[in-house]
Amino acid sequence: MGDLRELKNLKDKPIGMILRNYYPKAFVLHQDVLFRVDGPGQALPGITKDERESNKLMKKLQQPGLMEKIWEKILYELEVHGFNRKEIENVSQFEDDEEEDKINVIVPSKVDLRLDKGLNVGRCQNCGHLHYLNYMLRNSQGLPIHSNCRKGKNSRYKQAPVFVPYPNDPNEATRPLSSDQLKVQTVLPTDVNCLYLKPGGKCAHPNTQDGLCSSKMDEQHSYMMLGPNYPLSGIKVTNPYCPKGLTDIRPRPMITHRAGTGYRYYKKFPDSGITQRLYTTVAWEDKKKTEKIESINNQIREVKKTWFNKDLINFEETNFSIIVVIDLVYGLRIGGYYDHWLRGIGNNNVLGRMLQTQGFVITIKDSIWEVASSLDKFASDEEDPVEDRVRNIVHTLKHAILNQIPTFTGIEETKFGGSYEILGKDKGAKIYLFDNEVGGHGGFETLMNDVSRFSKMIETVYNQTKCPIRKCRVACKHCLFLRNCGLGNHKLNRKMLLESGILQEQV
């Protein structure tokens, strides 16, 4: 298998999927082995730049005010994650005439996946045998197999559990450069080897006859057993298949890595969720209207007035539309730590794409500020609590609708995207909901074409926002959470959304 996998022809994969899973320093499970996006890159590790598409996107960012809007949105989201905005601004001190240099967007043409040598332990999925990935036999597909498995012929090896860093104090989760400084660790050699294996291939078992272990490396190794009820906490390491026939090799808990000051390691099953991207999305309407879009908007002209409150929604500017989207990945979470790639003027490199798609635009009136001001029972520790409440209401409405779209289209959550924008102090807001593919995949078009289905979805949105399962305080997985939230599902409040009165209860 080697230690490198390349995603060379990204045209075979949706660019949105690349940005979700193959961003710099991300862990990616490929053929049951954990790889990492890493290696030489012109500006971002593991990423080869598509010069043409990157230049095209950067040219678009010269549109008046767009670069500044994106920069402000990134800074706001980093603040929500816990970073100090002023520290980032102090590192990146721009002149007023240098807006185009605030960030450098890189559209990828190739991604390198490299085997992290520190995560070199696999576990047989049948018998639990532990072995090093670079010593495993491979089948015709290049997948690692355990040819001597006692429980199945040519059983497959999968990545063994890994140890992921988490801060002792959640308030210290923001740590620039943590993706380089903190390592995800694999099973210690002490646990890979049999309990009684000693240097020089000697055996210290009290019943050994010759004092020697097998000369074959894989026969010197232990087996990892998972607890049936609590697989992670119930992990035991033992050796029920000693090649010398020795028994009474006691099971022992897997050793956890010793961490540095201020953090600890937690066992996790290896998956791509060890890392998550930090990203933002900026969108706007393309004012061009096709015949199909005009037809759909004519169909919903009156019925949309039953979906939303007329005092808070501008119905003339709430329509099915062509939408231009810019997606940007500017950092990541590794284990329990957040890191970003804003390294200062000239080095604020981010991963991104631009697409034109189809979707639904909701335009909220200036009166939302008056409503937010009246909701002072919802406390806020922000400098401007009214603006914070406006953001909560708008962000929550975006979540509430996106949460239900997969159910009413039969298309998975990652195929849709959303963005919102506060238009300014005492001004309204925009919410953009769209198909997450170039040109659109028909999801929103199908939904908007069926007025009764969209109305039924809004009814479900209203009821779901009441949290039908556990009546949570602000938001939870049963009502509002989304897997791909740029704010990490912060700044949500279902009760505030309901009390704002934006949504009309469907009759």
Image (tube, rainbow, N blue to C red):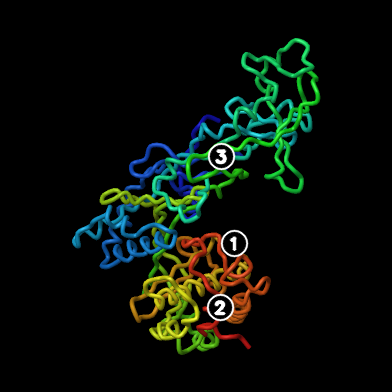
Could you tell me how many numbered marks the image carries? 3
Q: Residues under labels 1 and 2: Cα distance?
A: 27 Å
Front label number (1 vs 2): 2
Residue at 57 percent of width and 27 percent of height:
134
Amino acid beneath label 2: Lys
Amino acid beneath label 1: Glu
User: Quadrant of residue 400 in the image?
Assistant: bottom right
User: Quadrant of residue 475 in the image?
Assistant: bottom right
Residue at 63 percent of width and 44 percent of height:
269
Q: Residues under labels 3 and 2: Cα distance?
A: 41 Å
Q: Does residue 191 lie above or below 233 as drawn?
A: above
Using a 10 Å C-alpha cutoff, classify the residue at mark 3 as few (fewer than 14 neighbours), some (14 to 19) or many (20 or more).
many
Query: What residue is disc 2 on?
Result: 495
Q: Does residue 194 lie above or below 350 as drawn?
A: above
> Which of disc 2 and disc 1 is earlier in sequence?
1
Q: Is residue 86 visible?
A: yes
* Quarter containing the C terminus: bottom right
Of the pair 195 and 330, the residue shown nearer to us: 195
The picture places residue 29, in percent across and down from the top left corner, at 57, 43
Q: Does residue 83 lie above or below 314 as drawn?
A: above
Query: What residue is disc 3 on?
Result: 34
Query: What residue is disc 1 on?
Result: 412
> Which of disc 3 and disc 1 is earlier in sequence?
3
The picture places residue 192, in percent across and down from the top left corner, at 64, 29
Q: Secondary structure at mark 3?
A: strand
